Amino acid sequence: MDTVMQFDAYGGSANLQEKVKRRVEELEGELSTTQENSDIFHLNQEKTAELSADTRYLMQEALALGVETDGALDISIYPVVQSWGFTTGNYRVPSESERESLLKSVDYRLVGLEADTASIEPGMMVDLGGVGKGFTGDEVVKTMKEDGVTSALFSLGGNIQTIGTKPDGEKWYVGIKDPESDGYLGGVRVQDEAVITSGGYERYFTDDDGTIYWHIMDPSTGAPAHSGLISVTIIGPCGLRCDGLSTALFVMGREKAAAHWAAHQDYEAVLVDESGTIWLTPGLKDRFIPVDQGGDAGDSDIVILEQI
Ligand code: ADP
Ligand code: MG
């Protein structure tokens, strides 16, 4: 997954590391957009493909999140991600007309999902990158539990997932990165939860004027999402859902994010806007622990997200 995995786990067998590695590689082989022979690679090439049970499940859940977020999460955004150079590192700013023409192929509602096959229209391509790491984390949790693990914290490319508490019974402490520095905004204590962040700072390029273009795209414009948010962290029991929502709420912006939270209330969120204000869902009021970085972070406004 082009990413590093680190873990701390208690109670597993001597083969735990090997089992986790095998499962992550298996998922990568199914879900990758670039590995030839993956389900997604076939689908993007042939426009129809048979899917493994994993790919089918993830695609079904990602499409449901597309409906739930009114298209803020759209797995058919891939041609747009590609046109900005995020798949190769050859970054560029596509013209308005190029974007308009690419957007004609972006619509998650046109992805057909049958018993064990998927099909897309000519010109369409799908990418499960907005949900893949969270789902992989859920599968790592399963693999670890099956191996006897009762307590674990692992990081999959910056996404944190946990099993149980620390061996001493205390909750795990997970730091949340400050999008504007190398430090942390603060942290939360968690148990059996995922903490997943989508940040503008994670993968981006700048043009000659210093404008920043990041890898989270607004499917309604075909350009990097400019919703006023620069970082969204979702905390909840399901990694797949947290990952999908971190991307979607980043696209939606603070007000729509607040409305989404109020309608569902099955997760907590930390939103950071362009002015540096930190917005917390009410459930984090007593759980969020701000970090004082030499007086700096102490200046951040922390506001409880009002229910809309
Ligand atoms: P990361 O995986 O880098 O931690 P995200 O979970 O936010 O970050 O996913 C971003 C990835 O998802 C992008 O690299 C791209 O492949 C894909 N993507 C970008 N915008 C969207 C979107 N609006 N809907 C679905 N997938 C997206
Ligand atoms: Mg995501």
Image (cartoon, helix red, strand yellow):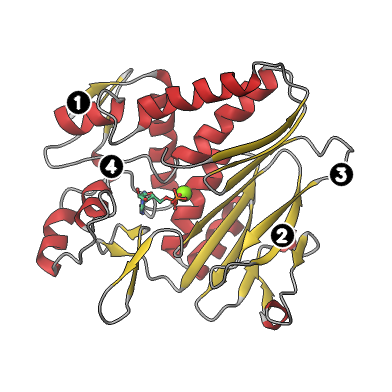
Does residue 134 appear left or right of residue 305 in this picture? left
Which residue lies at the image location 25% right of the left edge and 30% below the top edge? 41
Q: Which mark's residue is nearer the viewer, 2 or 1? A: 2
Give the mark nearer the N terminus: 2 vs 1. 1
Near-viewer residue (91 or 226): 91
Give the residue number, with chain letter if any, for mark 4.
109
Residue 162 point in image, percent of width and height = 69, 39
Residue behind mark 3: 170
Residue tagged 2: 187
Kindly identify the residue that appears in the image at 73 percent across and 79 percent down: 294
* Residue visible at 18% across and 41% down in the picture: 124
Residue 141's place in the image compared with 86, above or below, is above
From mark 4 to mark 1, how far is it between C-alphas? 15 Å
> Which dot, 2 or 4, sits closer to the camera?
2
Amino acid type shown at disc 1: Thr
The residue where tag 1 is placed is 48
Q: Residues within 10 Å of mark 2 (few under 14, many from 20)?
A: some
Say which quadrant the N terminus sits in: top left
Q: Is residue 157 left or right of residue 290?
A: left
What is the C-alpha distance between the residues marked 1 and 3? 48 Å
SS for dot 3: loop
Q: Is mark 1 within 8 Å of ligand 1?
A: no
